[in-house]
Amino acid sequence: MGGQEDKGVKFLITIFQDENGMFIAECPSIPGCVSQGQTEAEAEKNIHEAIKECLEVRVEKGMPLIVPTPA
């Protein structure tokens, strides 16, 4: 598990390639949670870190952790 405990929480992410060739990753259930990478794998790695950081900020500010997204 790469040294990290799996807490069982899963988030849907989307990854697309922009016009400049960068891969953009977003987590639709966390508003503003976006990252990028030069490869799809790098974007996926970066969005996992961004999700963690976004959730920490939302907890500090007393905001809801996620918003409902259509299934």
Image (cartoon, grey):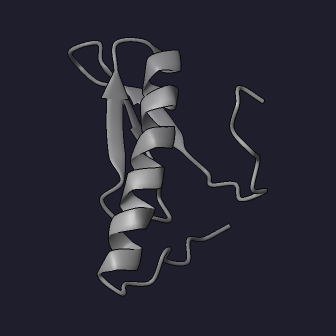
User: Up-down: is 7 above or below 15?
Assistant: below
- Which residue occupies the foreground of this view, 24 or 59? 59
- In the image, residue 69 sits, relative to residue 41, either above or below, namely below
Relative side of 29 to 3, left or right? left
Q: In this view of the protein, which residue sits in the foreground, 52 or 29? A: 52
- Between 19 and 4, the residue placed more toward the observer is 4
Which quarter of the figure is the C terminus placed in?
bottom right
Residue ranking furthest to the bottom: 62
Q: Which residue is situated farthest in the front direction here?
A: 3
Residue 2, by quadrant, is top right
Report x, y in % for residue 25: 42, 37
Q: Position of residue 26 (x, y in %)?
A: 42, 46
Q: Nearer the viewer, residue 14 or 38?
A: 38
Q: Which residue lies at the image location 34% right of the left edge and 46% below the top edge?
A: 34
Q: Quadrant of the N terminus?
A: top right
Q: How many marks?
A: 0
What residue is at 53 percent from the left and 17 percent from the top? 41
Left or right for 10, reference 66:
right
- The quadrant holding residue 22 is top left
Determine the image quadrant of residue 7: bottom right
Q: Check the image and report above or below for 54 versus 15.
A: below
Q: Residue furthest left?
A: 20
Identify which residue is drawn at 51% across, 40% down.
48
The residue located at (44%, 64%) in the rendering is 55
